[in-house]
Image: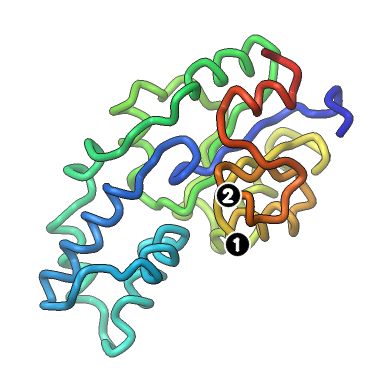
């Protein structure tokens, strides 16, 4: 990697910026319980953890022709009460500060839809990103590269001037299709340019720590 070329670092949210496993499991388990279905299996959890809420509900309720009642239930449940179960990744604030000092663009590309702004507000991160792309802002969420391409276009970047940090196959495929650098976070099974376990390692790759 030619470090001097990197102008932007974009993060996935769930599993990268935050450990959201507990929050997401509690959320979907409550939805399933409302319809007298058993809690998520580990296989189901791995899949819904990557998906948009819409795709996750379609996956969890394949027997339902009309999902309207389930989506209405989601509105009543809401996600706000589950945000407290999220845990910010150690070193994230420090890395974001280092990126700012280095003049790099900081972004988020997530398959969350309408909860990302609330998450950033609750954890006092609202001013720490120059761009936030959610599934609600694109026609085709990850693994489609649309969200990453939107960021590239917005800042007039070449694809090799951006790093995407993710933890799932959806993230890997999106990065590959957008032709950006990909850093696998806490998931050594993914095909990536780099595989890291900490935020500080990302700073090390960029030589800004």
Q: Quadrant of the N terminus?
A: top right
In the rendered view, would you say 58 is above or below 6? below
> Which is nearer the eye, 83 or 187?
187
Identity of the residue drawn at 31% across and 70% down: 41
User: Is the C-beta separation of discs 2 and 1 under 8 Å?
Assistant: no
Q: Give the label on residue 153, or none.
A: none
Quarter where residue 204 is shown: top right
Among the two numbered marks 2 and 1 on one chain, the one whose residue lies closer to the N terminus: 1
x, y percent for residue 200: 60, 22
Q: Name the residue at the top extreme.
A: 101
Q: In this view, does 109 lie to the left or right of 20?
A: right
Q: Residue reaching furthest right? A: 2
Look at the numbered disc 1 and give the secondary structure of its residue. loop
Residue 143, label in figure: 1
Q: Decide if residue 206 is on the left or right side of residue 137.
A: right
Where, quadrant-wise, is the C terminus in this rendering?
A: top right
* Label 2 neighbour load within 10 Å: few <14, some 14-19, many 20+: some
Location of residue 150 in the rendering, given as x and y in whole percent from the top left corner = 65, 47
Which numbered disc, 2 or 1, marks the residue closer to the eye? 2
Which residue is drawn at the image coordinates 30% and 38% (left, top)?
86
Which of the pair 42/23 is nearer the observer? 42
Q: Residue at x 55, y 49 (%)?
A: 167
Q: Is residue 118 placed above or below 4 in the rendered structure?
A: below
Q: Which mark is drawn over residue 187?
A: 2
165, 205: nearer the viewer: 205
- Residue 19: x, y in percent? 39, 41
Q: In which quarter of the image is residue 131?
A: top right
Quarter location, residue 116: top left
Q: Residue at x 71, y 37 (%)?
A: 163
| Colouring | rainbow
Q: The residue tagged with tag 2: helix, strand or loop?
A: loop
Cα–Cα gap, marks 2 and 1: 17 Å
């Amino acid at each position: 990697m030619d470090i001097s070329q990197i102008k932007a670092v974009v993060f996935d949210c769930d599993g990268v910026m935050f450990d959201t496993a507990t929050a997401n499991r509690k959320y979907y388990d409550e939805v399933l319980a409302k319809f007298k279905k058993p809690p998520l299996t580990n296989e189901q959890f791995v899949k819904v953890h990557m998906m948009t809420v819409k795709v996750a509900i379609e996956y969890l309720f394949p027997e339902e022709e009309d999902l309207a009642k389930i989506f209405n239930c989601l509105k009543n449940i809401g996600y706000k009460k589950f945000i407290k179960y999220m845990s910010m990744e150690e070193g994230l604030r420090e890395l974001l500060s280092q990126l700012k000092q280095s003049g790099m663009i900081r972004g988020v590309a997530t398959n969350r839809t309408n909860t990302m702004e609330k998450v950033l507000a609750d954890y006092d991160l609202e001013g720490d990103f120059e761009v936030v792309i959610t599934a609600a802002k694109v026609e085709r969420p990850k693994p489609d590269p649309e969200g990453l391409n939107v960021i590239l276009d917005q800042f007039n970047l070449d694809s090799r001037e951006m790093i995407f940090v993710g933890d799932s196959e959806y993230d890997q495929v999106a990065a590959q299709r957008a032709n950006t650098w990909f850093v696998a976070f806490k998931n050594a099974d993914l095909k990536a340019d780099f595989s890291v376990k900490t935020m500080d390692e990302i700073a090390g790759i960029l030589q800004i720590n």
